[in-house]
Amino acid sequence: MNAATDAVTDALRDLHSRFAGIDDGELADYIPQLALVDPEAFGLALISMDGHRYGAGDAGVPFTIQSVSKPFVYALALSVLGIDEVSRWVNAEPSGEAFNAISLELGTGRPDNPMVNAGAILTTALIPDTPGAPRFGRILDCLSRFAGRMLDVDEQVYFSEVVAGDRNRALAYLIRSTGPLPVDPVAAVETYFRQCSVRVTAMDLAAMAATLANGGVNPLTGDTVVTEPVAVRVLAVMATCGMYDASGDWLLRVGLPAKSGVSGGLIAAGPARFGLASYSPLLDPTGTSVRGHRAIGALSERLGLHLM
Ligand code: DON
């Protein structure tokens, strides 16, 4: 180990022990299965551009990806359809609203951005669905390539999402009623629920974030998952919209493109430097992991990671 490696390892371990005692926040319970997890679970992971993996605590504990899937499915849509075509369907402006708000552009009905549920459901619907390459198969394959290993679906969480999914179904019908939705709302939402139910660990999420930070090339496998312009656009949208109505505050304080999810996953990316992830399921009112937010914020300060 060299000095830099030591510094990262020490920082992750220190921050893990510093924030493990914090028990502020609540488990998400609007998807019943998410309320059954261990509230104490807490893991941190970082992967550098040379593929070095660092972890502390529960970095290998599985949980469902939830909204952290959104930037990666957006990346897939951009790769398949191109930036101009995707922009016709979904905008890239911060909504300043909660993740499940009706964030649709007045007049056109176009979702404000692909990080809120409305925009994510539409983005999922844009992925082509053919007998040889079904929509969800493409999504799972893409998420797996970002992670560098084959991922799977937590079927119990998926069924729980279906049972609790009225608001997302309502959003899909609303998008169709006011503007564009290329497929049947039920089909769009079911694929979106499956995508949210993909099982990952904090180390997987660090690999996914590191792939975006590395211009689309997975630093563990060498696989070019997306092109550099796609990776750059996704990071830019994460910076402006990834933390919903807390995106401005996050960028001011932490200074990294990021994405949160209601199961307690959180990613942040340092372009050309690292991918970082945390897992702790106790959430603040914006749906962000309390320990994750504090640990990544403190890591940014300690290692001077703020981009500005
Ligand atoms: O659609 C939902 O409500 C969940 N499957 C995902 C929401 C989510 O992760 C919001 N992020 N903090």
Image: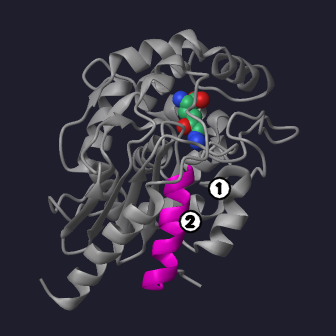
**Main secondary structure type of the part rendered in magenta:** helix
Q: Position of residue 86 (x, y in %)?
A: 56, 46
The answer to whether residue 71 is left or right of residue 56 is: right
Looking at the rendered structure, the secondary structure element under dot 1 is helix
Where are the magenta residues, as a range? Answer: 290-304
Cβ atoms under marks 1 and 2 closer than 8 Å: no
- Residue at position x 31%, y 42% from top? 142
Q: Label 1 belongs to which residue?
A: 241
Say if the magenta span includes residue 293: yes
Q: Label 2 belongs to which residue?
A: 236
- Given residues 137 and 48, the one toward you in this image is 48
**Local crowd size for mark 1, using a 10 Å CA cut-off: few (<14), some (14–19), many (≥20):** many
Q: Amino acid at mark 2?
A: Ala
- Given residues 227 and 29, the one toward you in this image is 29
Any part of residue 120 in sight: no
Any part of residue 234 in sight: yes
The answer to whether residue 219 is left or right of residue 156 is: left
Q: Position of residue 161 (x, y in %)?
A: 51, 18
Q: Amino acid at mark 1?
A: Cys
Q: Position of residue 43 (x, y in %)?
A: 35, 52
Ligand 1's image quarter is: top right
- Residue at position x 64%, y 26% from top? 181
Residue lying at the far bottom in this picture: please name it.
Answer: 3
